[in-house]
Image: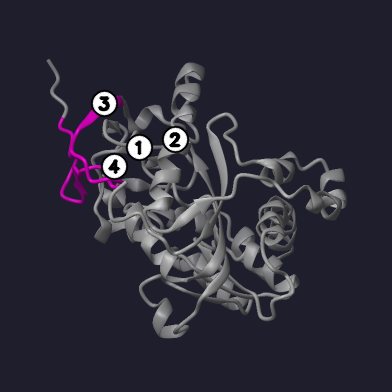
């Protein structure tokens, strides 16, 4: 009989629910890392993950949050997004070189996917306000920031991926590691905050949301997207785990849980879509970019994805949910 050890090495730990703090959990699924779709160029041996490493996903009985547990410790989080990606960056140098034509083409295509979310957030702002500030949490290579600047905003971003931060700096963008942002750009408060394709990655969601909230002006709009638990069951049925990739994608929010989580920090969901902005997206929609349309119209889940808008009213429900 083979006995599996939940904690693979000293870089991992078993935790209470990172959203509500409850220790009451049930097992959702466990899989070997080798059973996941292997992403070319990503090498997780730096954190001790091998093909026979077993990964566990659990559900909090108290709040319904679904999350990978055990997970990487906070102090080793940067390794996953730096050292483990070295081969990928070496293999695809042109795609990550701001001076290359490949980078230009790639970022031009990706920008279409970010137009919808940004316009949707803008539709709920007072656009007559001078000096609108955009803050991008998990800014990547700066696509949304560059769009925000094109719309006349002052844009700032944070990321823990050193390569992507370097690209942003070469593009002249105002970025920093989260731990160093306040030293580089003190007292920044944002009107629009983007949390795109990142919430599923963060080791400590509460810490991330607290950080984001500290950057919000009263009435700020937050756009967040990510994965719901449904994606796990859909991919299990299909027999291939792709988005449910339990090394980097470690958080899966039911919408009800996400709303309660956001409310604990003073964020309230915006429940309607301002249809007036559709005329502004006419040219984008003609390109057939379905993701853009979903981003604009989507306060609902779709095949295991969610897109959600919140407004900051500063009235936090408390530390728990």
29 to the left or right of 228: left
- 56 magenta-colored: no
Task: Determine which residue is flagged by label 3.
Answer: 27
- If you read the primary sequence from the N terminus, does the residue marked by circle 4 or circle 1 appear first? 4
Secondary structure under badge 2?
Answer: loop
Spatial separation of the CA atoms under disc 2 and disc 3: 16 Å
- If you read the primary sequence from the N terminus, does the residue marked by circle 2 or circle 1 appear first? 1
Colouring mode (rainbow / by chain / secondary structure / one colour): one colour
Image quadrant holding the N terminus, namely: top left
Mark 3 nearby-residue class (10 Å; few <14, some 14–19, many ≥20): some
11 to the left or right of 249: left
Residue displayed at 61% across by 41% down: 299
Q: Give the residues drawn in magenta, as a range.
A: 5-28
Mark 1 nearby-residue class (10 Å; few <14, some 14–19, many ≥20): many
Q: Is residue 181 above or below residue 226?
A: below
Indicate the quadrant where residue 61 lies: top left
Q: Is residue 131 above or below residue 109?
A: below
Task: Determine which residue is flagged by label 2.
Answer: 254
Q: What x and y, as percent, mark residue 155?
A: 61, 74
Q: What x and y, as percent, mark residue 229?
A: 43, 31
Residue displayed at 56% across by 46% down: 308
Task: Determine which residue is flagged by label 4.
Answer: 49
């Amino acid at each position: 009989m083979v006995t599996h050890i939940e904690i693979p090495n000293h870089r991992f730990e078993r935790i209470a629910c990172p959203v509500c703090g409850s220790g009451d959990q049930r097992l959702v699924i466990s899989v070997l890392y080798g059973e996941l779709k292997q992403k070319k160029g990503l090498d997780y041996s730096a954190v001790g993950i091998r093909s026979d490493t077993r990964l566990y996903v659990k559900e909090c009985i108290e709040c319904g949050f679904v999350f990978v547990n055990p997970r990487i410790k906070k102090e080793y989080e940067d390794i996953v997004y730096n050292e483990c990606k070295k081969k990928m960056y070496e293999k695809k140098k042109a795609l990550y070189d701001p001076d290359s034509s490949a980078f230009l083409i790639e970022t031009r295509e990706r920008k279409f996917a970010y137009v919808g979310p940004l316009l949707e957030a803008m539709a709920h702002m007072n656009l007559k306000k001078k000096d609108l500030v955009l803050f991008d949490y998990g800014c990547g290579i700066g696509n949304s920031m560059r769009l925000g600047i094109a719309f006349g905003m002052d844009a700032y971003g944070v990321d823990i991926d050193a390569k992507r931060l370097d690209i942003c700096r070469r593009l002249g963008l105002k970025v920093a590691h989260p731990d160093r942002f306040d030293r580089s750009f003190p007292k920044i408060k944002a009107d629009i905050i983007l949390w795109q394709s990142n919430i599923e990655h963060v080791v400590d969601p509460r810490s991330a949301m607290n950080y984001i909230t500290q950057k919000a002006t009263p009435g700020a709009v937050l756009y967040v997207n990510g994965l719901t638990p449904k994606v796990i069951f859909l991919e299990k049925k299909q027999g291939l785990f792709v988005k449910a990739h339990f090394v980097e994608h470690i958080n899966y929010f039911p919408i009800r849980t996400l709303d309660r989580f956001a409310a604990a920090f003073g964020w309230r969901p915006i429940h309607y879509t301002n249809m007036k902005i559709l005329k502004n997206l006419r040219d984008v929609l003609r390109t057939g970019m379905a993701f853009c349309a979903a981003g604009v119209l989507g306060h609902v889940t779709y095949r295991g994805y969610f897109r959600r808008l919140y407004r900051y009213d500063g009235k936090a429900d408390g530390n728990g949910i």
